[in-house]
DNA sequence: GCTTACTGTGTATGGCATTCATAGTTTTAC
DNA sequence: GTAAAACTATGAATGCCATACACAGTAAGC
């Protein structure tokens, strides 16, 4: 239903209302608001003020949209180097974590999708080069990259699960009680000791990252003294 | 449609055709065969020779079934200790990997679900105690557990993605070519060096695990000489 | 001015989880 | 021994969903 001439603004040139950019932007917003489960092509189209089918002009499937949204938010990571290789990695991976916190749906997607969009490749390249600069190569280099990115993904995935449980508004207080009791029953004294400051995720993240980085450090070739 | 008396066997006591066990068993089989995307209550019921709604007598929702299936396969990990803490962990986490390889849908579920089923708790407890025996406690203990389990989850998730791409029968040869080319273009020489034996996942897994374990070792208190 | 391409959409198909009412069967209670 | 209650299983209906297809309005090219 085109608007009647009485309300239309013919002065500016008519541009296509939709575009891949607008779709991706809307998809990220919708995913942020509703999560992967609440994401649908219908809802996305509604948010963009378009018919559902119109999206398929710019994208072949829902999967495409998810792939694009994923690479889009990965682009939020600034691909900067810091001083040392270690600083570069800490900075880069901390930013990865922040992206995944801002967009809690990311881990669910990365668990089933190859990360081969342009932004993802650029970021992964940075990690490779940092470790190569540190002196790693061959299988150990691969293993180090794998250990680091796996750590970050895994950490934030479980962190997000935790937040999702905490964040939920009301009736889950009881549910949380029960889970904690459940855990206590099994993990007993160990759990209680460890649970000191259970929610200091920032500290935990850096602590674990240091652990992995220390492990990597043990594999560095002896520093050349030039 | 009950069988006519002419073919019925009235000798043994009539048991319920369905049960939570049968449902979970069927769910695991279905997930193995069709993956998370192909899993539906309808298909599960059909596989069990029952009406869809019958499942809801034993289970409240599809989510329940997935939770149960997940904990079920985690139960395949034998909770044994080996000699040293390190051996125990390598053994335990290697088995985790094998379970996730046998049931490639697991990472997709663990990415969005808390692992608080009975089997999961028992296995996680084993990891905690192994590290506590090694001498860790407090936040470092937590970080070590997080680093290890994150590493395993993350590693197998990307490994599974790789296998899924490779396994697909025919037309994906071209697709794979394109991905590799894409990667080469971005990662250039680094990628090529690292890609030596790219598919030796067993070795890669142990290499990365050693890396993390070495990092943990650096945090152990000095061994008491009693 | 005619044709061709582009952008956007409505409808239809087939699949999905889940609610509800209900039927057949077994167990229990008197 | 039978009437009532509980258990097991189900079909139909609701309201989601992704997407194939045919088609309309609009702009661009010649």
Image (spheres, coloured by chain):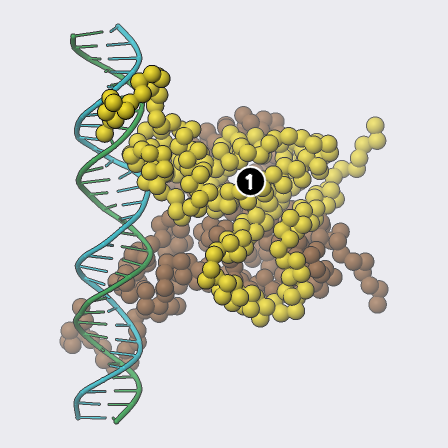
Chain colours: A yellow, B brown, C green, D cyan
Q: Where is residue A53 in the image (x, y as percent from the top left)?
A: 29, 34
Q: Which residue is drawn at 55% across and 44% down?
A: A101
Q: Residue at x 36, y 34 (%)?
A: A48
Q: Where is residue B155 in the image (x, y as percent from the top left)?
A: 56, 47
Q: Position of residue B90 (x, y in %)?
A: 63, 56
Task: Tell me the subunit letter for badge 1.
Answer: A
Q: Is residue A2 visible?
A: yes
Identify whether A95 is placed above or below A202.
above
Q: Which residue is drawn at 40% across and 58% down?
A: B63
Q: Residue at x 61, y 27 (%)?
A: B189
Identify whether C29 is placed above or below A164.
below
**Is A100 left or right of A11, judged from the image as shown?**
right
Image quadrant assignment for residue B226: bottom right
Q: Residues within 10 Å of mark 1 (few under 14, many from 20)?
A: some
Q: Position of residue B80 (x, y in %)?
A: 60, 66
Identify whether A2 is placed above or below B204.
above
Image quadrant assignment for residue B125: bottom right
Q: Mark 1 points at which residue?
A: A99
């Amino acid at each position: 239903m085109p608007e009647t001439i009485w309300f239309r603004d013919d002065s500016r040139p008519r541009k296509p209302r939709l575009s891949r950019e607008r779709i991706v932007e809307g998809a990220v917003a919708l995913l942020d608001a509703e999560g992967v489960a609440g994401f649908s092509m219908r809802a996305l189209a509604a948010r963009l003020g378009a018919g559902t089918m119109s999206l398929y002009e710019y994208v072949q499937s829902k999967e495409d949209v998810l792939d694009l949204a994923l690479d889009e938010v990965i682009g939020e990571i600034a691909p900067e180097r810091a001083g040392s290789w270690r600083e570069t990695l800490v900075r880069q991976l901390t930013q990865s974590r922040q992206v995944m916190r801002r967009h809690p749906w990311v881990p669910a997607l990365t668990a089933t999708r190859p990360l081969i969009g342009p932004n993802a490749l650029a970021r992964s390249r940075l990690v490779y080069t940092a470790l190569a600069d540190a002196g790693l190569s061959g299988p150990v280099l691969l293993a180090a990259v794998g250990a680091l990115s796996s750590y970050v993904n895994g950490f934030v995935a479980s962190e997000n699960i935790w937040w999702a449980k905490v964040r939920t508004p009301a009736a889950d207080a009881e549910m949380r009680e029960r889970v904690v009791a459940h855990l206590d029953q099994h993990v007993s004294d160990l759990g209680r000791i460890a649970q000191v400051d259970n929610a200091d995720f920032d500290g935990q993240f850096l602590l674990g990252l240091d652990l992995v980085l220390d492990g990597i450090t043990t594999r560095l070739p002896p520093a050349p003294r030039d």
